[in-house]
Image: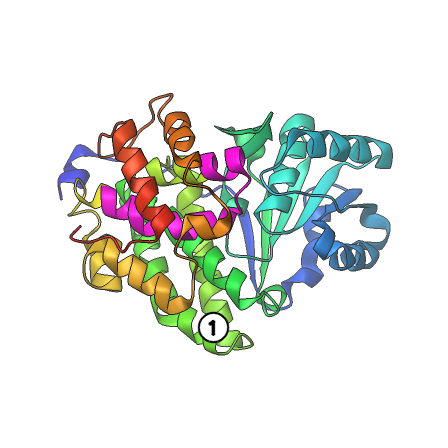
Amino acid sequence: MSDLMQGFTFPGIRTRVVFGSGTLSRVGEEIEALGRSRALVLSTPPQAEAAGTLAGELGGLSAGTFTEATMHTPIEVTEAAMEAYRTAGADCVVSYGGGSTIGLGKAIATRTGADHVAIPTTYAGSEMTDILGETVDGEKTTRRDASIRPETVIYDVDTTLTLPVEMTVTSSLNAISHGIEALYAEDRNPILSQMAVEAMRVFKRSLHRVTEDPQNRAARTDVLYGAWLCSTALGYVSMALHHKLAHVIGGSFGMPHAETHAILLPHTTGFNAAATAELLAPVAEIFGGSVGGGLWDFAKRAGAPLRLRDLGLSEADLDRAAEIATRAPYPNPRPFDRSDIRNLLQAAWEGARPEGE
Protein backbone atom coordinates (compact mmCIF):
# COMPACT_ATOMS: atom_id res chain seq x y z
CA MET A 1 0.00 0.00 0.00
CA SER A 2 2.86 2.39 0.74
CA ASP A 3 4.00 2.37 -2.88
CA LEU A 4 0.49 3.24 -4.06
CA MET A 5 0.23 6.09 -1.59
CA GLN A 6 3.50 7.50 -2.89
CA GLY A 7 2.16 7.30 -6.43
CA PHE A 8 3.76 5.84 -9.54
CA THR A 9 4.28 6.45 -13.24
CA PHE A 10 3.43 3.77 -15.78
CA PRO A 11 4.96 4.72 -19.15
CA GLY A 12 2.80 2.35 -21.20
CA ILE A 13 4.03 -0.39 -23.53
CA ARG A 14 5.24 1.07 -26.81
CA THR A 15 6.26 -1.96 -28.87
CA ARG A 16 3.88 -3.91 -31.09
CA VAL A 17 3.93 -7.61 -30.12
CA VAL A 18 2.90 -10.56 -32.29
CA PHE A 19 2.84 -13.77 -30.20
CA GLY A 20 1.93 -17.33 -31.14
CA SER A 21 2.83 -20.31 -33.28
CA GLY A 22 3.68 -19.82 -36.94
CA THR A 23 3.98 -16.06 -36.53
CA LEU A 24 7.30 -16.04 -38.39
CA SER A 25 5.23 -16.04 -41.57
CA ARG A 26 4.03 -12.54 -40.70
CA VAL A 27 7.43 -10.82 -40.85
CA GLY A 28 6.80 -9.44 -44.33
CA GLU A 29 3.47 -7.88 -43.46
CA GLU A 30 4.96 -6.35 -40.31
CA ILE A 31 7.74 -4.76 -42.39
CA GLU A 32 5.17 -3.35 -44.77
CA ALA A 33 3.05 -2.08 -41.87
CA LEU A 34 6.04 0.01 -40.83
CA GLY A 35 6.19 1.50 -44.32
CA ARG A 36 9.52 -0.20 -45.07
CA SER A 37 10.60 -2.28 -48.07
CA ARG A 38 14.29 -3.28 -47.73
CA ALA A 39 15.12 -5.36 -44.66
CA LEU A 40 18.63 -6.48 -43.75
CA VAL A 41 18.25 -9.77 -41.85
CA LEU A 42 20.72 -10.21 -38.97
CA SER A 43 21.92 -13.32 -37.14
CA THR A 44 24.92 -14.95 -35.51
CA PRO A 45 27.01 -17.41 -37.59
CA PRO A 46 25.26 -20.50 -36.14
CA GLN A 47 21.88 -19.14 -37.28
CA ALA A 48 23.05 -17.98 -40.70
CA GLU A 49 21.11 -20.70 -42.49
CA ALA A 50 17.85 -19.75 -40.77
CA ALA A 51 18.50 -16.08 -41.52
CA GLY A 52 19.08 -16.93 -45.18
CA THR A 53 15.84 -18.90 -45.31
CA LEU A 54 13.94 -15.99 -43.76
CA ALA A 55 15.51 -13.54 -46.22
CA GLY A 56 14.48 -15.81 -49.08
CA GLU A 57 10.92 -15.97 -47.82
CA LEU A 58 10.79 -12.17 -47.67
CA GLY A 59 11.55 -12.03 -51.40
CA GLY A 60 11.66 -8.46 -52.64
CA LEU A 61 11.42 -7.14 -49.09
CA SER A 62 14.87 -8.55 -48.31
CA ALA A 63 18.06 -6.51 -48.68
CA GLY A 64 20.18 -9.56 -47.84
CA THR A 65 21.76 -10.84 -44.63
CA PHE A 66 24.51 -9.99 -42.17
CA THR A 67 25.31 -13.07 -40.09
CA GLU A 68 28.27 -12.02 -37.93
CA ALA A 69 26.48 -10.79 -34.80
CA THR A 70 28.63 -11.41 -31.73
CA MET A 71 28.14 -11.62 -27.99
CA HIS A 72 28.28 -8.29 -26.11
CA THR A 73 27.95 -6.24 -29.34
CA PRO A 74 31.60 -5.27 -29.96
CA ILE A 75 31.87 -1.96 -31.78
CA GLU A 76 33.93 -3.39 -34.64
CA VAL A 77 31.13 -5.81 -35.54
CA THR A 78 28.61 -2.97 -35.45
CA GLU A 79 30.78 -0.96 -37.84
CA ALA A 80 30.94 -3.89 -40.28
CA ALA A 81 27.16 -4.33 -40.05
CA MET A 82 26.62 -0.63 -40.66
CA GLU A 83 28.66 -0.87 -43.86
CA ALA A 84 26.59 -3.88 -44.96
CA TYR A 85 23.39 -1.95 -44.18
CA ARG A 86 24.47 1.03 -46.30
CA THR A 87 25.78 -1.09 -49.16
CA ALA A 88 22.55 -3.08 -49.33
CA GLY A 89 20.41 0.05 -49.47
CA ALA A 90 18.38 -1.22 -46.52
CA ASP A 91 15.74 0.84 -44.74
CA CYS A 92 15.08 -1.48 -41.77
CA VAL A 93 16.56 -4.44 -39.94
CA VAL A 94 15.15 -7.80 -38.89
CA SER A 95 17.09 -9.47 -36.08
CA TYR A 96 16.64 -13.24 -35.81
CA GLY A 97 18.20 -14.78 -32.72
CA GLY A 98 19.07 -14.06 -29.11
CA GLY A 99 20.49 -11.07 -27.32
CA SER A 100 23.63 -10.84 -29.48
CA THR A 101 21.66 -10.45 -32.70
CA ILE A 102 18.98 -8.20 -31.24
CA GLY A 103 21.69 -6.03 -29.72
CA LEU A 104 23.26 -5.60 -33.15
CA GLY A 105 19.87 -4.65 -34.59
CA LYS A 106 19.51 -2.02 -31.88
CA ALA A 107 22.99 -0.67 -32.55
CA ILE A 108 22.14 -0.17 -36.23
CA ALA A 109 18.70 1.28 -35.49
CA THR A 110 19.91 3.90 -33.03
CA ARG A 111 22.63 5.03 -35.45
CA THR A 112 20.50 5.18 -38.60
CA GLY A 113 16.90 5.68 -37.49
CA ALA A 114 16.01 2.34 -39.08
CA ASP A 115 12.91 0.50 -37.94
CA HIS A 116 13.66 -2.78 -36.22
CA VAL A 117 11.65 -6.00 -36.22
CA ALA A 118 13.04 -8.36 -33.57
CA ILE A 119 12.44 -12.11 -33.61
CA PRO A 120 13.81 -13.57 -30.35
CA THR A 121 14.68 -17.27 -30.42
CA THR A 122 15.81 -17.40 -26.78
CA TYR A 123 14.34 -16.04 -23.55
CA ALA A 124 17.07 -13.46 -22.87
CA GLY A 125 14.73 -10.47 -23.02
CA SER A 126 16.55 -7.76 -24.97
CA GLU A 127 13.76 -7.38 -27.49
CA MET A 128 11.29 -5.27 -25.50
CA THR A 129 13.82 -2.81 -24.15
CA ASP A 130 15.42 0.52 -24.96
CA ILE A 131 18.72 -0.75 -23.54
CA LEU A 132 21.88 -1.27 -25.60
CA GLY A 133 25.07 -2.73 -24.20
CA GLU A 134 28.18 -2.32 -26.37
CA THR A 135 31.77 -3.39 -25.84
CA VAL A 136 34.61 -1.00 -26.65
CA ASP A 137 38.26 -1.72 -25.79
CA GLY A 138 37.31 -4.65 -23.59
CA GLU A 139 34.72 -2.87 -21.43
CA LYS A 140 30.96 -3.00 -21.80
CA THR A 141 28.92 0.16 -21.47
CA THR A 142 25.15 0.35 -21.35
CA ARG A 143 22.81 3.15 -22.35
CA ARG A 144 19.08 3.72 -22.82
CA ASP A 145 17.36 5.74 -25.53
CA ALA A 146 13.98 5.63 -27.25
CA SER A 147 15.70 5.08 -30.62
CA ILE A 148 17.05 1.74 -29.34
CA ARG A 149 13.66 0.10 -28.71
CA PRO A 150 12.46 -2.21 -31.54
CA GLU A 151 9.21 -1.16 -33.23
CA THR A 152 7.86 -4.71 -33.51
CA VAL A 153 8.62 -7.99 -31.76
CA ILE A 154 7.50 -11.31 -33.21
CA TYR A 155 7.44 -14.26 -30.82
CA ASP A 156 7.06 -17.62 -32.56
CA VAL A 157 7.15 -20.59 -30.21
CA ASP A 158 8.17 -22.79 -33.16
CA THR A 159 11.59 -21.07 -33.26
CA THR A 160 12.28 -22.16 -29.67
CA LEU A 161 11.54 -25.87 -30.06
CA THR A 162 15.14 -26.63 -31.03
CA LEU A 163 16.72 -24.40 -28.40
CA PRO A 164 19.17 -26.66 -26.52
CA VAL A 165 18.15 -27.53 -22.97
CA GLU A 166 21.26 -25.91 -21.48
CA MET A 167 20.55 -22.62 -23.22
CA THR A 168 16.86 -22.89 -22.38
CA VAL A 169 17.74 -23.02 -18.69
CA THR A 170 20.33 -20.23 -18.60
CA SER A 171 18.23 -18.00 -20.85
CA SER A 172 15.22 -18.53 -18.59
CA LEU A 173 17.22 -17.57 -15.49
CA ASN A 174 18.42 -14.51 -17.38
CA ALA A 175 14.77 -13.61 -17.97
CA ILE A 176 13.88 -14.18 -14.32
CA SER A 177 16.62 -11.73 -13.31
CA HIS A 178 14.79 -8.99 -15.22
CA GLY A 179 11.58 -9.67 -13.36
CA ILE A 180 13.28 -9.75 -9.97
CA GLU A 181 15.06 -6.43 -10.44
CA ALA A 182 11.80 -4.89 -11.65
CA LEU A 183 10.28 -5.71 -8.26
CA TYR A 184 12.69 -3.46 -6.35
CA ALA A 185 13.54 -0.91 -9.07
CA GLU A 186 13.47 2.69 -7.89
CA ASP A 187 10.97 3.47 -10.68
CA ARG A 188 8.87 0.33 -10.21
CA ASN A 189 5.12 0.36 -10.70
CA PRO A 190 2.35 -2.11 -9.80
CA ILE A 191 1.57 -3.12 -13.39
CA LEU A 192 5.09 -4.29 -14.16
CA SER A 193 5.46 -5.83 -10.70
CA GLN A 194 2.38 -7.97 -11.34
CA MET A 195 3.80 -9.00 -14.71
CA ALA A 196 7.11 -9.93 -13.08
CA VAL A 197 5.50 -12.08 -10.40
CA GLU A 198 3.29 -13.82 -12.96
CA ALA A 199 6.36 -14.55 -15.07
CA MET A 200 8.13 -16.21 -12.14
CA ARG A 201 5.10 -18.41 -11.50
CA VAL A 202 5.14 -19.40 -15.17
CA PHE A 203 8.84 -20.30 -15.11
CA LYS A 204 8.46 -22.22 -11.85
CA ARG A 205 5.67 -24.42 -13.21
CA SER A 206 6.92 -24.89 -16.77
CA LEU A 207 10.72 -24.76 -17.01
CA HIS A 208 11.17 -28.27 -15.65
CA ARG A 209 8.56 -29.54 -18.13
CA VAL A 210 10.69 -28.14 -20.96
CA THR A 211 13.90 -29.66 -19.63
CA GLU A 212 12.19 -33.04 -19.37
CA ASP A 213 10.55 -32.76 -22.81
CA PRO A 214 12.10 -30.02 -24.99
CA GLN A 215 9.45 -30.56 -27.68
CA ASN A 216 6.57 -29.92 -25.30
CA ARG A 217 4.86 -27.14 -27.25
CA ALA A 218 2.54 -26.10 -24.41
CA ALA A 219 5.42 -25.78 -21.95
CA ARG A 220 7.56 -23.93 -24.51
CA THR A 221 4.70 -21.52 -25.11
CA ASP A 222 4.37 -20.95 -21.38
CA VAL A 223 8.08 -20.21 -20.97
CA LEU A 224 8.13 -17.89 -24.00
CA TYR A 225 5.19 -16.02 -22.49
CA GLY A 226 7.11 -15.69 -19.22
CA ALA A 227 10.09 -14.36 -21.17
CA TRP A 228 7.89 -11.70 -22.79
CA LEU A 229 6.57 -10.63 -19.39
CA CYS A 230 10.10 -10.28 -17.99
CA SER A 231 11.42 -8.53 -21.08
CA THR A 232 8.60 -6.00 -20.83
CA ALA A 233 9.43 -5.36 -17.18
CA LEU A 234 13.08 -4.90 -18.09
CA GLY A 235 12.15 -2.43 -20.79
CA TYR A 236 10.34 0.09 -18.60
CA VAL A 237 12.18 0.24 -15.27
CA SER A 238 15.81 0.72 -14.27
CA MET A 239 17.97 -2.25 -13.40
CA ALA A 240 20.36 -2.45 -10.45
CA LEU A 241 23.24 -4.49 -9.01
CA HIS A 242 22.54 -7.77 -10.77
CA HIS A 243 22.64 -6.32 -14.25
CA LYS A 244 25.66 -4.18 -13.51
CA LEU A 245 27.65 -7.21 -12.37
CA ALA A 246 26.48 -9.33 -15.31
CA HIS A 247 27.63 -6.64 -17.75
CA VAL A 248 30.97 -6.26 -15.98
CA ILE A 249 31.68 -10.00 -15.96
CA GLY A 250 30.47 -10.44 -19.53
CA GLY A 251 31.86 -7.36 -21.21
CA SER A 252 35.19 -7.06 -19.41
CA PHE A 253 36.07 -10.75 -19.14
CA GLY A 254 34.32 -12.26 -22.17
CA MET A 255 32.07 -14.55 -20.15
CA PRO A 256 28.88 -15.90 -21.81
CA HIS A 257 25.90 -13.66 -21.13
CA ALA A 258 23.09 -16.04 -20.13
CA GLU A 259 25.34 -18.31 -18.07
CA THR A 260 26.71 -15.33 -16.17
CA HIS A 261 23.20 -14.10 -15.36
CA ALA A 262 22.17 -17.59 -14.24
CA ILE A 263 25.09 -17.97 -11.84
CA LEU A 264 24.89 -14.48 -10.35
CA LEU A 265 21.12 -14.41 -9.86
CA PRO A 266 20.80 -16.23 -6.49
CA HIS A 267 23.70 -14.22 -5.06
CA THR A 268 22.63 -10.74 -6.18
CA THR A 269 19.00 -11.37 -5.25
CA GLY A 270 19.98 -12.81 -1.90
CA PHE A 271 22.20 -9.79 -1.22
CA ASN A 272 19.40 -7.33 -1.98
CA ALA A 273 16.79 -9.36 -0.10
CA ALA A 274 18.16 -7.99 3.17
CA ALA A 275 16.85 -4.55 2.18
CA THR A 276 13.78 -5.57 0.16
CA ALA A 277 12.16 -8.40 2.10
CA GLU A 278 8.60 -7.19 1.51
CA LEU A 279 9.12 -6.52 -2.20
CA LEU A 280 10.78 -9.89 -2.75
CA ALA A 281 8.33 -11.88 -0.62
CA PRO A 282 6.64 -13.29 -3.76
CA VAL A 283 10.00 -14.66 -4.91
CA ALA A 284 10.46 -16.57 -1.65
CA GLU A 285 6.89 -17.83 -1.87
CA ILE A 286 7.28 -19.06 -5.46
CA PHE A 287 10.72 -20.65 -5.22
CA GLY A 288 10.62 -21.65 -1.55
CA GLY A 289 12.93 -21.03 1.38
CA SER A 290 15.08 -17.93 1.48
CA VAL A 291 15.13 -15.74 -1.60
CA GLY A 292 18.72 -16.50 -2.62
CA GLY A 293 18.59 -20.12 -1.48
CA GLY A 294 15.30 -20.79 -3.23
CA LEU A 295 16.60 -19.44 -6.53
CA TRP A 296 19.83 -21.44 -6.15
CA ASP A 297 17.83 -24.63 -5.53
CA PHE A 298 15.62 -23.92 -8.57
CA ALA A 299 18.68 -23.30 -10.75
CA LYS A 300 20.40 -26.47 -9.53
CA ARG A 301 17.30 -28.58 -10.18
CA ALA A 302 17.09 -27.18 -13.70
CA GLY A 303 20.71 -28.12 -14.35
CA ALA A 304 22.04 -24.56 -14.56
CA PRO A 305 25.74 -23.77 -14.06
CA LEU A 306 26.39 -22.64 -10.49
CA ARG A 307 30.04 -21.49 -10.46
CA LEU A 308 31.71 -18.60 -12.26
CA ARG A 309 34.95 -20.57 -12.16
CA ASP A 310 33.40 -23.11 -14.54
CA LEU A 311 32.98 -20.39 -17.17
CA GLY A 312 36.72 -19.76 -17.15
CA LEU A 313 36.78 -16.73 -14.85
CA SER A 314 39.85 -16.88 -12.62
CA GLU A 315 39.83 -16.06 -8.93
CA ALA A 316 42.38 -13.35 -9.67
CA ASP A 317 39.80 -11.64 -11.92
CA LEU A 318 37.44 -11.05 -9.02
CA ASP A 319 39.35 -8.09 -7.61
CA ARG A 320 39.31 -6.27 -10.95
CA ALA A 321 35.63 -7.10 -11.47
CA ALA A 322 34.74 -5.64 -8.07
CA GLU A 323 36.78 -2.52 -8.85
CA ILE A 324 35.05 -1.98 -12.22
CA ALA A 325 31.60 -2.60 -10.72
CA THR A 326 32.09 0.09 -8.06
CA ARG A 327 33.70 2.84 -10.14
CA ALA A 328 30.49 4.81 -10.56
CA PRO A 329 27.33 4.93 -8.43
CA TYR A 330 24.05 3.50 -9.71
CA PRO A 331 20.68 2.78 -8.11
CA ASN A 332 20.41 -0.26 -5.87
CA PRO A 333 18.09 -0.87 -2.93
CA ARG A 334 20.93 -1.96 -0.64
CA PRO A 335 24.12 0.11 -0.27
CA PHE A 336 27.38 -1.69 -0.96
CA ASP A 337 31.12 -1.14 -1.22
CA ARG A 338 33.90 -2.92 -3.05
CA SER A 339 34.32 -5.43 -0.25
CA ASP A 340 30.65 -6.41 -0.45
CA ILE A 341 30.90 -6.99 -4.19
CA ARG A 342 34.15 -8.91 -3.85
CA ASN A 343 32.54 -11.23 -1.28
CA LEU A 344 29.45 -11.71 -3.46
CA LEU A 345 31.59 -12.57 -6.47
CA GLN A 346 33.67 -15.00 -4.41
CA ALA A 347 30.53 -16.88 -3.42
CA ALA A 348 29.35 -16.97 -7.04
CA TRP A 349 32.80 -18.08 -8.19
CA GLU A 350 32.76 -20.95 -5.70
CA GLY A 351 29.09 -21.79 -6.32
CA ALA A 352 28.13 -21.60 -2.64
CA ARG A 353 24.42 -21.73 -1.83
CA PRO A 354 23.22 -18.37 -0.43
CA GLU A 355 21.84 -18.85 3.05
CA GLY A 356 19.46 -16.94 5.26
CA GLU A 357 18.26 -14.11 3.04
Which residues make up the magenta segment? 247-271
Q: Kindly identify the residue that appears in the image at 27 percent across and 56 percent down.
A: 353
Residue 2: which quarter of the image?
top left
Q: Amino acid at mark 1?
A: Thr
Q: Magenta stretch: dominant SS?
A: helix
Instruction: Give percent across and percent down for residue 199.
Output: 37, 59
Please name the residue shown 80% across and 30% down the image.
83
Q: Is residue 185 visible?
A: no
Q: Is residue 91 visible?
A: yes
Viewer-proximal residue among 40 and 212: 212
Indicate the position of residue 243 as horizontal and vertical percent values: 40, 39
Residue 65 coordinates in the image, percent (x, y): 80, 46
Residue 250 in percent (x, y) is at 50, 39
Give 258 or 318, whichever is nearer the viewer.
318
> Is 300 left or right of 99, judged from the image as shown?
left
User: Which residue shows up at 80% across the image and 53% down it?
Assistant: 55
Task: Find numbered disc 1 in the image and state the secondary structure of the residue it sits on.
Answer: helix
Determine which quarter of the picture holds residue 20: bottom right
Q: Which residue is mark 1?
A: 211
Counting other residues with Cα less than 10 Å from the Cα at mark 1, is it few (<14), some (14-19), or many (20 or more)? some
Q: Is residue 332 above or below residue 24?
A: above
In this rendered view, identify the residue nearer to me: 93 or 133. Answer: 133
In the image, is residue 238 above or below residue 209? above
Q: Considering depth in this image, is 250 or 78 the residue closer to the camera?
A: 250
